[in-house]
Amino acid sequence: MAEEQTATLRVDEAVQLAHALLTRLAEIEGVRILFIKGPSAVLMGARPPRPSSDVDVLCEPGGMEKLGAALERCGWRRRVPESANSHFVHAAKYLFEHSVHYIHDEWPCDLDIHFNFPGFFAPDDVVFEALWERRATAEVAHWPVPCADFPGQAMIVALHALRDPENSHSRDDLARVAEVMQSATREDRATLSALAARTGCSDLLRPLLDDVAAPFTESNWRDPEMHRRWLVRTEDPRLPTASWLIALSHTPWRSRPAAIREALFPRRSLLLGQHIGADPGSLEMARIRMNRWIRGLRHLRRGLATARRSEGRPK
Amino acid sequence: MTGSEDVTWRRAPHLAYVDDSERVVILDLTQPDSGIPRLLSGSAAEVWRLVEQPARLEAIVGALVRKYGVPRSDIEQEVRAFVDHLADLRILAPNEGSGEGDGLRHKHVV
């Protein structure tokens, strides 16, 4: 008889079981979470089925610390983002970074713990409560998990797709949301509009709302400056270099030399934060650094132009 | 715990699992800090599937005999030992009505 053994997880298994694991950890810690995108969006009908390689969850304000600590007790560790350059300040807002990423040597998937989601201009607590009030339950890995309902998932899927409109998945996802909304009742379309207004993404989703003949409701959380930055950023998929330049532009002059030095010669932990698996040797580390310089130089000119447009400066 | 013929076995309620028909991967969520995903494949996975509804050892063995076309005497002892092993791992449990584990699955659902 074939035996029971410790599993080497496949990606699809890891993604599904991670939903259950996060649900259980959040319950133990008394933290509210909502799964978004991925399997839960598929189950809510807001996205076409396709394999997922990571898990996205929206965490209630103030809950990240406890949930993160619980994950670390289970062997997960934070994946360090590029904007973790210690000399950057206030980078997250301008880089539309709204999540903390976790990785595990034995789980072939990332966990993205969001405290907000790019495109929602309302405060974190307003967004979370608006989605929490209408939460649904999906079964993933035969475990009930809390998730955003269809309108919530539809907004998030659409915002994600609009960030990278040239991506083939983005086009399919927007088409799916539009298709469902076009056959929805007038009341359901009004619900989507109201939710978009409440969470501060009405302006960004206006093209979709118009396309499905949903009424446009102006949001109290409009942010023309962030909207402009969003539009510029979505024009250019070469995000990392532009992101770094934007973060640098918001760094005090006296800190910029150190920031540049750190970018050219980043800490080992920053480089390894982007990689999964066993720590590389010195030769592999050299290769990682060289590839990073090559990517940065390749995208420098275009990244400069994008960064200048994002900051509202002439070319 | 012994695989007594009088025991009806069921899946423990505190388990999340993925079954792609080739293999089953199970995660125990009672103590997530120490939870290790466990893999069942081949006939071990079949045992798991046979207790989707509570079942006695006799029924489990009988189903395996029919599926694999082997004499009962060839597998009965092995299946009993394996069921005991899964019980020790808290993957299977005696079906004694709703137990403490049932609350884990439904607690947060509102």
Image (cartoon, coloured by chain):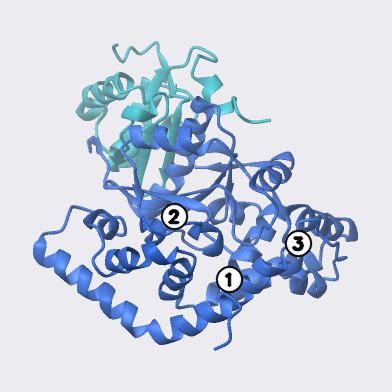
Chain colours: A blue, B cyan
Note whether residue A236 is visible. no
Residue under pointer 1: A163
Q: Which mark is residue B32?
A: none
Residue under pointer 2: A54
Earlier in the chain: of badge 1 and badge 3, it is 1
Labels 2 and 3 within one chain: yes
Crowd rating for badge 3 (residues with CA inside 10 Å; few <14, some 14–19, many 20+)? some
Secondary structure type for disc 3:
loop
Crowd rating for badge 1 (residues with CA inside 10 Å; few <14, some 14–19, many 20+)? many
Residue A185 drawn at (x, y percent): 87, 60
Identify the subunit bearing mark 2: A
Q: For marks 1 and 2, give the CA distance.
A: 18 Å
Residue A81 drawn at (x, y percent): 39, 58
Q: Is residue A206 left or right of residue A228?
A: right
Q: Are marks 1 and 3 in contact (CB under 8 Å)?
A: no
Residue under pointer 3: A222
Identify the subunit bearing mark 1: A
Q: For marks 2 and 3, give the CA distance.
A: 30 Å
Q: Of the residues shown, which amino acid type is indicated by label 1?
A: Arg
Note whether residue A52 is visible. yes
Earlier in the chain: of badge 2 and badge 3, it is 2
Q: Nearer the viewer, residue A150 or B78?
A: A150
Q: Is residue A185 left or right of residue A298?
A: right
- Residue at 34% over, 41% down: A76
